[in-house]
Image (cartoon, helix red, strand yellow):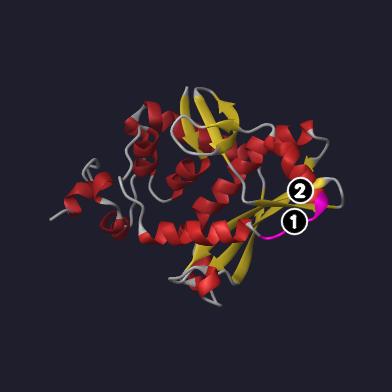
Amino acid sequence: MVECHASTLSSWFWCAKKAVDQLHGVVPDFKSQALQRGTDVHDWLAKRPKDLKTLEIVDGLAKFKVKSSFRSGTFFPRQYKDFNVMGDIDDIVLVDDKYIRILENKTIRIPERIEKFWYVSPYVFQVGIYCWILEPIVKEIGYRLADTHLIQWFSSLTALPAECPTCGRMFERTQVRYDEQEVLSRLEQIHAAYHDPNLIIYPKIPWKCERCDEVYRRNCPKGNLTLA
């Protein structure tokens, strides 16, 4: 079985070659400053208080989580062919006492990018994967998934929220409608490319390659052309 996380699969919409490389274990050996800022803000958001009913649901869901073979923490799993797809959600909200809506928190420095398809599409797919993973699980605890879910965009800037009054401020929400067939179609596309590199679709936008981490560019027939 190939352990693959929703965050890795979502990068397919940014660069299919990068997504496949990550599935094969090619990753940078450092954590970028932007990624660290995002982690800090996520940790801060996770500490916000929840009502008793939400805590009860979160505890019920947690029983289905398993350990990763290479990441710290626990994740919700679901199998797709020889992919063990894993993911963890940021938050939930209960709708009409019976539907669970997934909330995905994202940090961003330039809010105008929220309107850009190339920027938002990986995160929309990521939420779709979470929905697909959790759909049978929420039924097990007596609930159903809501039809729509939310990406919540928060300011990251350059400091921790506790140290910066504008950090952690919500810019906007992006509504995501779960489409199971769309998610399965994309998973099949990624699965096929994982087993057959000839099916990998390379980015048509040159600046994506220029901004890509060197560890990926050196392993890419297109990206390595941008290396000096």
Q: Nearer the viewer, residue 94 or 224?
A: 94
Q: Secondary structure at mark 1?
A: loop
Residue 20: percent from the left, percent from the top? Answer: 38, 37
Q: Which mark is residue 134?
A: none
Q: Which residues are magenta?
A: 48-52
Residue at point 29%, 58% (across, down) = 211
Residues at circles 1 and 2 in contact by the CB criterion of under 8 Å:
yes
Furthest toward the left, the residue is 228
Amino acid type assigned to the residue bearing label 1 in the image? Lys
Residue 144 placement, left or right of 22: right
Whether residue 62 appears in this view of the structure is yes
Q: Nearer the viewer, residue 39 or 177?
A: 39
Identify the image quadrant of the C terminus.
Answer: bottom left
Residue at point 35%, 56% (across, down) = 32
Q: Is residue 71 highlighted in magenta? A: no
Question: Exactly how many numbered labels are in the figure?
Answer: 2
Furthest toward the bottom, the residue is 165
- How far, Cα to Cα, is label 1 from label 2? 6 Å
Q: Is residue 51 highlighted in magenta? A: yes
Residue under numbered circle 1: 50
Amino acid type assigned to the residue bearing label 2 in the image? Leu
Residue under numbered circle 2: 55
Residue 147: percent from the left, percent from the top? Answer: 74, 49
Q: Is residue 54 above or below residue 119?
A: above
